[in-house]
Image: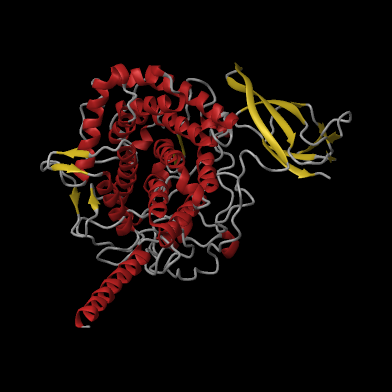
Amino acid sequence: MSKFGGSLLGVSILLTVLLGAATAAAEYYSYGNALEKTFLFFEAQRSGKLPAAQRVKWRSHSGLKDGLAQGVSLEGGYYDAGDHVKFGLPMAFAVTMLSWAAVDNQKELSGSNQMQQTLWSIRWGTDYFIKAHPQPNVLWGQVGDGQSDHYYLAGETAAALAAASLAFKPYNSSYSTILLTHAKELFSFADKYRGLYTDSIPNAKAFYMSSGYSDELLWAAAWLHRATGDEYYLKYAVNNAGYLGGTGWGMKEFSWDNKYAGVQVLLSKILLEGKGGVYTSTLKQYQMKADYFACACLKKNGGYNIQTTPGGLMYVREWNNLQYASAAAFLLAIYSDYLSAANAKLNCPDGSVPPQALLDFSRSQADYILGKNHQGMSYLVGYGPKYPIRVHHRGASIPSIFVQRSSVNCVQGFDSWYKRAQADPNVIYGALVGGPDQNDYYSDDRTNYEQSEPTLSGTAPLVGLFAKLSGKLGSYGGGYSKPYQTPKPPASSYKAPTPTTYTPKQSGAPIEFLHSITANWMAYNTRYYRHKVIIKNNSQKPISGLKLKIEDLTGSIWGLAPTGQKNTYQLPQWQKTLKAGQACDFVYVQGGPQAKVSVQSYH
């Protein structure tokens, strides 16, 4: 009896420990909740004419005339951080990170119903890059004056568009083709006219000083090879491995300015899949450098390791340090998957470790960001009971014009709002601030921009990171067991409406649209595309009176008849009805992104 009783006691203690661990996990590991919020930050950073489905209501249209004085439309894209400047280099890096997540974390993002939001976030950037690349050898790299706002790089943009073409390929093949066309042209442009983007845009030096273009060329080649399967790009990365530093540099950081570790991991995937062929020898050198980065993060690199704070946060430099932690965590989560798929281990100077160890590191950085730190503070704004409330962000720190009913000029904003001790009137949900110092100390001060300013490049890697971790932890990882109770925001702040949907390819619907590009050409320094759209009746009965809404149409259209209503078209007189299973098509020609086609009504 005593032995039996002792076993029950042991089971009881074990259950208590397990339940306690699960509770702690649920407290810090609400990755699904955090993932949802990161998309709101990208909505808050939108420039241009905002869509009706915009959820961050304290933001409005802006930058509608960007580029017009130079004879080009540069409306759209994202503001970089807390200011009103669109820096092309970090924006392109952010789009690449979002696209990488959409490609390699497709299962997790789809499972959490966040793939649509991911694609929207990517497209807000890629539509802008298409506008910024009006000619094969022209790329507009920056909108705004960083100097006055506080009182671009073809290689990275090519990588972003190539990665995005992969992300969109299963959902919108015609848009994917457009992105890939621009990516190829930009890579040729970047390789032919090598140089720092800050040489062409000196004003960017004070904010995003590029340390070199070599990594961006390899980065673009690696993504173009993955997107196209064309051996030319792999051969480029191999032949230039030494000259451009791909197999020479062992890194301890991964960021918007330094992509070598990303290149090395991406090319290691080819080797791990057994597809190295005649390039195996050089690809092994790339993998050695990928292992160097991973081993350094795990502190198993023979002493050549990353620096961490007492609380375990990766620490690279004083200004906006969390961007390095988020990027490294995402990259190691990706590499963990590549190693696992190949049933391989990570070989470090201090011993071999399983792929799970890389994911454990990634989780440790995510948990620190979400509140498992000495200050008990979440550095993702709007997540958890305690988070930064004085963010260095102009839009968040000044009341919306919808509330104040009067505009605030730059000087007035600085004098009246910048140094206020009160909390921001607008909660900028999902923003990853710069984060604490090397001793885990954070000062929640709006003027402390090194710690309190959020950036695109810091927040973007969190999408793939949180998606991966939420998929690994199941239900409580998605934030359902014990989610944080987020405090109610001020009256002027965001209130979540019913989520909107994004259907790039309306497969399975009664009416299906199949987009394709049948030709493209250059005319008067502009690239034009011939779009063919097949309309198919997937239902079991005839459809008549079909009316389509076609938005963003700037060129000519054939095969449809106008209705007299704005942006609304109907089938021609001779074809009023589509029988069950029947299809018809129409064609339009225009430059830039494709038009948006949707069903308005039918009977």
Horizontally, is 287 left or right of 27 in the view? left
Image quadrant where residue 223 sits: top left
On the image, the x and y values in percent for residue 531 come to 66, 26
164 with respect to 245 (left or right): right
Against 184, residue 386 (above or below) is: below
Extreme residue toward the bottom, this view: 1
Q: Give whichever of 169, 53 is nearer the camera.
A: 169
The answer to whether 272 appears left or right of 460 in the picture is left
In the picture as drawn, the residue positioned furthest to the front comes out as 1
Which residue is depicted at the point 80% across and 30% down? Answer: 560
Where is the C terminus found, in terms of image quarters? top right
Query: How is the rendered protein coloured?
Result: secondary structure
- Quadrant holding the N terminus: bottom left
Residue 405 visible in rendering: no
Q: Residue extending furthest right?
A: 573
Q: Quadrant of residue 537?
A: top right
Rendered location of residue 377, percent (x, y): 32, 65
Find residue 356 and report its horizontal and vertical position in percent: 28, 48
Percent position of residue 299, x then y: 16, 47
Tell me the residue at 38%/20% (across/down): 233
Whether residue 107 is visible to the viewer of this picture, yes or no, is yes
